Amino acid sequence: MRAFHHRPLGDHWCYLVLDGVWLKVRRAFGPQRVLLLVAYGIRQDGTRQLLAFTRAKSESQAGWEGLLNDLWRRGLRGENLQLVITDGCPGLARALETVYPRVRHQRCWVHKMRNILERVRRRDEKQVKAQAQKIYLAEHVAAARRAFERFRFHWRSRYPAMIRQLERDLSELLHFFVFPRHLWRKLRTTNVIERCFVEVRRRTRPMVVFTNVESVDRIIYAIFSRFNEDWKNHTLELFAQAA
């Protein structure tokens, strides 16, 4: 496990996906949730790895800076890094500005859509969802901005706070349009890492809770190592096409 946490990463990673996952640990005073911050990298040829994970108390700027600085120390300086994809966590956004300030930051559209729909009345959900989806399903970035303007005009009087937040985040929601069209679906969400978390939860569910935080590290290391081994012969073909 020490070798995993200290191995050199190199600087050939083009895309970085960052997210956190909560797991349960058994303590003397009862179960406690433990947060893992995780980094998933993709090279230009479509090869991928789970690069790092660390325990943290919260998704704060300090917590994420700890993980990002670890990536930096191990060789991921960002010279070839084209895009970092996140769920829009404010602490993570601030950490990225500190460690990788020149790299584009793409906010996840799945999380953004969830956030939008949480702010609207049930009777409006279907129409709001359909109109918001037209932004990221647009043919190009200019069309996406026009779709947002129509969305804003239609809903700004009814949901001003939701519109202000979407307008504030819009540029970081549209960075994926810079890349080849066949990558858009992959680059506009954190789904690749979320699928890993689904598998982590599936494999750890029979354990109910971990006995201590050290057992969390051991089990997650074993699961991530298995992912990385399996992926050696299974590249992300869409990314390889763009190489």
Image (cartoon, helix red, strand yellow):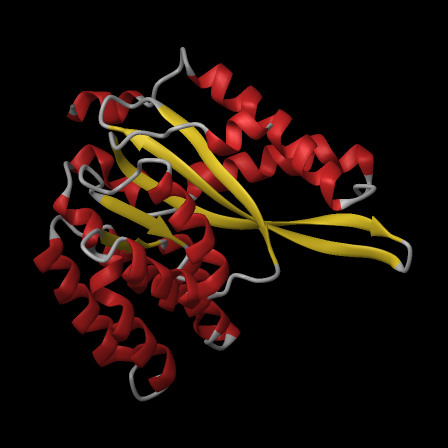
**Extreme-right residue of the structure:** 28
Check the image and report above or below for 238 versus 76.
above
Tell how many labels: 0
User: Along the horizontal axis of the image, is 100 left or right of 109?
Assistant: left
Q: Nearer the viewer, residue 98 or 37?
A: 98
Q: Nearer the viewer, residue 147 or 206?
A: 206
Name the quadrant containing residue 181. Answer: top left
User: The N terminus is located in which quarter?
Assistant: top right
Question: Measured from the top left, where is residue 160 in percent x and y?
Answer: 34, 86
**Extreme-bottom residue of the structure:** 157
Name the quadrant containing residue 92. Answer: bottom left
Question: Measured from the top left, where is residue 210 in percent x and y?
Answer: 79, 41
Q: Which residue is found at the position 34% from the left and 60% from the top? A: 130
Question: Measured from the top left, where is residue 62 in percent x and y?
Answer: 47, 63
Q: Which residue is found at the position 24% from the left and 45% from the top? A: 83
**Extreme-left residue of the structure:** 142
Q: Which residue is found at the position 41% from the left and 14% from the top? A: 232
Q: Nearer the viewer, residue 224 or 52?
A: 52
User: Along the horizontal axis of the image, is 137 left or right of 214?
Assistant: left
**Extreme-top residue of the structure:** 233
Check the image and report above or below for 212 versus 100.
above
Q: Nearer the viewer, residue 37 or 151?
A: 37
Question: Measured from the top left, where is residue 243 in percent x and y?
Answer: 16, 23
Check the image and report above or below for 128 versus 154.
above
User: Along the horizontal axis of the image, is 85 left or right of 198?
Assistant: left
